Image: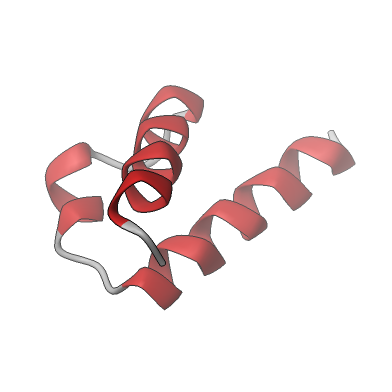
């Protein structure tokens, strides 16, 4: 994952809530992508 894509996902996860920026910055690229996909899935179910 490119740095800009990583920052974009971190920004969206921070905006959507549930995760702090410091926590997200410690996660691997795969973990960030998984958290993002999970959060989007949850929003679609609401």
- Tell me how many marks there are: 0
Q: Position of residue 46 (x, y in %)?
A: 84, 33
Q: Position of residue 2 (x, y in %)?
A: 36, 60
Q: Residue furthest top?
A: 15
* Residue under the point 41% across and 62% down: 32
Q: Is residue 31 left or right of residue 16?
A: left
Quadrant location of the N terminus in the rendered image: bottom left
Specify the quadrant of the image occupied by residue 7.
top left
The residue at 25%/53% (across/down) is 24
Horizontal and vertical percent position of residue 18:
41, 39
Which image quadrant for residue 31? Answer: bottom left
In the image: residue 8, left or right of residue 3: right
Is residue 17 or residue 1 the one in the foreground? 1
Image location of residue 4, percent across then percent down: 34, 44
Q: Is residue 21 left or right of residue 12?
A: left
Instruction: Please name whichever residue, 23 or 30, is drawn nearer the observer in this view of the structure.
Output: 30
Q: Is residue 13 above or below residue 24?
A: above
User: Is 11 rendered above or below residue 36?
Assistant: above
Residue at the image point whose x is 75% and y is 36% from the top: 43
State the colouring used for the structure image: secondary structure
Foreground residue among 26 and 1: 1
| Up-down relation of residue 5 to residue 21 (above or below) | below
In the displayed orientation, state which residue is furthest to the right. 45
User: Is 17 drawn above or below residue 26 in the view shown?
Assistant: above
């Amino acid at each position: 994952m490119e740095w800009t894509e990583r920052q974009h996902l971190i920004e969206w996860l921070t905006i959507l809530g549930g995760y702090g920026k410091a926590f997200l910055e410690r996660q691997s690229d795969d973990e960030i992508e998984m958290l993002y996909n999970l959060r989007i899935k949850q929003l679609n179910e609401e």
